[in-house]
Amino acid sequence: MGASSIRRQLLSLALMPLSLTILAVSVLAVVASLEDIESRLKQRGQDIGKQAVLMSEFYFYTGDQLQLNNVAAIVAGLEGVSSIRFLNAQGEVMVKRRNNAADKDLDDQHLFVIPIYSKGISLDEVAQLAGAQTELSEKLGSIEISLSKAALTPLREAAYMRILLVALGALLLGVLMVYLFGRRLSAALSETIEAAKSVKRGNMNSRAPENGEGEILEFQKVFNRMVGSVQQNEVQLQDRINSATRSLNETVAELSQSNRELAATRQATIELERSKAISDERARIMKDMHDGIGGQLVASLALIEKEQNSEIRANISSTLRECLDDLRLIILSLNMRDSTVSAVLADFKYRVHKKLQKLEIELIWEVDDIADHISLQPQQSLHLLRILQEVFTNTLKHAGASQIHLRLTSEQGKVRLSIDDDGIFTLDEEQRDCHGLNNMQWRAAELGGNLTVACNEAGGCAVRLDFAAADLSEVP
């Protein structure tokens, strides 16, 4: 489509000056042809006039009008002659003859006037010495011959047709030559344009075929060199962009790492400040509880121990001792840093062991090594200690058991703490909604697990605490 458009443009550009040239040449040819026709008409008129003079000179001299009339008839019968008149020396018409077949339009006539002279020979002495003859002439009259221009019409039409055919032939030949010579030129230009479009679409490997001539060939070479230079520049630019991108990515990665390290440092600082504040607050609370509530409980226990033995004294003493145990447990949890499950269980075992020995209850202790790798925050440690305290307290008070079996096992990231006794399971529907069981289930949820209480195969109480080891570090 590009080549066709270029050929049309080349044809249009070439036809305009070609048409103007052919038109100018045709006009000049028409003018020259018309002038030639007019010249031929004049020449014919002069020839007919000379013949008429030769035929009528003697009759003019003798005044024989009859013969002049015959001559006029002969001349009027010639092709193209409209009329003929013989005039004497005084301008009087002697003979007049008109060709009836000739054009009668006076504006389309060409008049020729030929004077007639009488000729005589005289010998002049000077002329004889010079060896020449001198003509002595006397005007006898004149002949007027009118030639019709209508006879020139076929000649004009033939000239017009001939010039028109030549002009059309020249125009067609010019079109053919422009097409043939422009075809190669347009093919070279169109292929160069297609290469330019391909380069525009991003194909830098595209090149124009160097199949032109002259300036077109030079243009194709310059175009190819220019595309090669652009391609090289694009490769260099892409390399620079890639290098800048890699450098930018490295800088961004370094900034991101620095930001993460800065955020970690800031978070560590915040946690440190928070831990310090919590530690200070714990120390203050522990001191207040130890010096205040603890001192009051110890003093109260010392006073009640001085009383006489009675059931009331025993109950109050037991209650005060339980309060001291709770207070120690709270102070212990507040005083703890991040600990492990094994450490919490070992501390609880140490504190409950003497009480179990006094009541002659056997404690079977089976703790998996996974307990050494499960970390607990202070609040989590308190939740676990409270659950253990509640379970053992209920067993000691209500079950009448002689053996308690504690096991901690793990499987696929799941940890289970099982506590079984061989006493009597007395948990009814009303007791299931009691405050102590609800507290244990709430604390189990805070550990990220769940707690169930049921009757085991021996008829005693079976407590199961299940939690995921991976979730413990995220429990508040």
Image (cartoon, grey):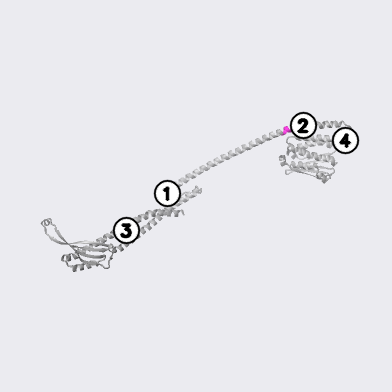
The reply to whether the C-beta atoms of the residues labelled 1 and 3 are less than 8 Å apart is no
Q: Is residue 90 left or right of residue 108?
A: left
- Mark toward the start of the polypeptide (4 vs 3): 3
Q: Distance between the residues labelled 3 and 2?
A: 136 Å
Q: Distance between the residues labelled 4 and 3?
A: 156 Å
In what element is the residue under mark 1?
helix
Q: Is residue 60 left or right of residue 223?
A: left
Q: In which quarter of the image is residue 140?
A: bottom left
Name the front one of labels 1 and 2. 2
- Mark toward the start of the polypeptide (3 vs 2): 3
* Residue 380 higher or lower than 213, as above or below: above
Q: Distance between the residues labelled 2 and 4?
A: 29 Å
Q: How far apart are marks 1 and 2 (CA)?
A: 103 Å
- Mark toward the start of the polypeptide (4 vs 1): 1
Residue under label 2, please give it. Answer: 288
Image coordinates for residue 352, horizontal then vertical, percent: 81, 36
Q: How crowded is mark 2: few (under 14 residues within 10 Å), some or many (20 or more)?
A: few
